[in-house]
Amino acid sequence: MLRHDGCEGVAKYTTEAIVSDGLDKGELRKVCTEAKCPVHHPRKRPQQIANDAKWKIDVDAIGLKVKHEFAAREKSNLTQKAATKAALAKVRKSA
């Protein structure tokens, strides 16, 4: 629940609640319980929605890039390990 600082004068949106976690545990607070409260749950503007979608696309692209880089490094490491094993086998064989 959200602390009800912005619309304390609107009694129908507030209720008393006991804090259940943290330093204020056990104390009474006025909280907002209304999902349509204009202070705590304002409607998103179309620009905010567009920015959220763009941000998600950017995050997904970065995640995909990281996955590809990780896979390339793994492949490179496996190739290096195989080359090292082959070189060691060749050295042991000639010794």
Image (tube, helix red, strand yellow):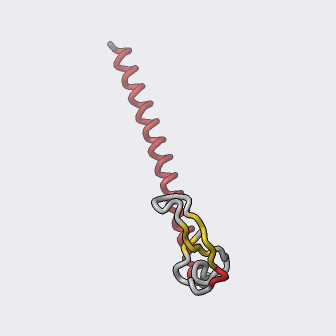
Picture quarter with the C terminus? top left
Q: In the rendered view, would you say 8 is above or below 53?
A: below
Residue at the far top in the pictured view = 95
* Viewer-nearest residue: 81 or 38: 38
Residue shown at the point (53%, 60%) measured from the top left = 26
Q: Residue at x 60, y 82 (%)?
A: 42
Q: Residue furthest front?
A: 27
Residue reaching furthest left? 95
Q: Position of residue 12 (x, y in %)?
A: 67, 82
Mark count:
0
Residue 6 seen from this side: yes
Point 37% across, 22% down: residue: 88
* Residue 50 locus on image (x, y percent): 58, 79
**Residue 45: which quarter of the image?**
bottom right
- Residue 63, position in %: x, y? 52, 58
Q: Looking at the image, is 89 positioned above or below residue 61?
A: above
Where is residue 35 drawn, in percent x and y?
67, 76
For the residue pair 91 and 66, the one nearer the viewer reads as 66
Picture layout, residue 80 above or below residue 36: above
Q: Is residue 46 visible?
A: no
Could you say which is closer to the camera, residue 93 or residue 19? Answer: 19
* Residue drawn at (40%, 20%) of the image: 89
Q: Quadrant of the N terminus?
A: bottom right
92 displayed left or right of 53: left
Q: Quadrant of residue 20?
A: bottom right
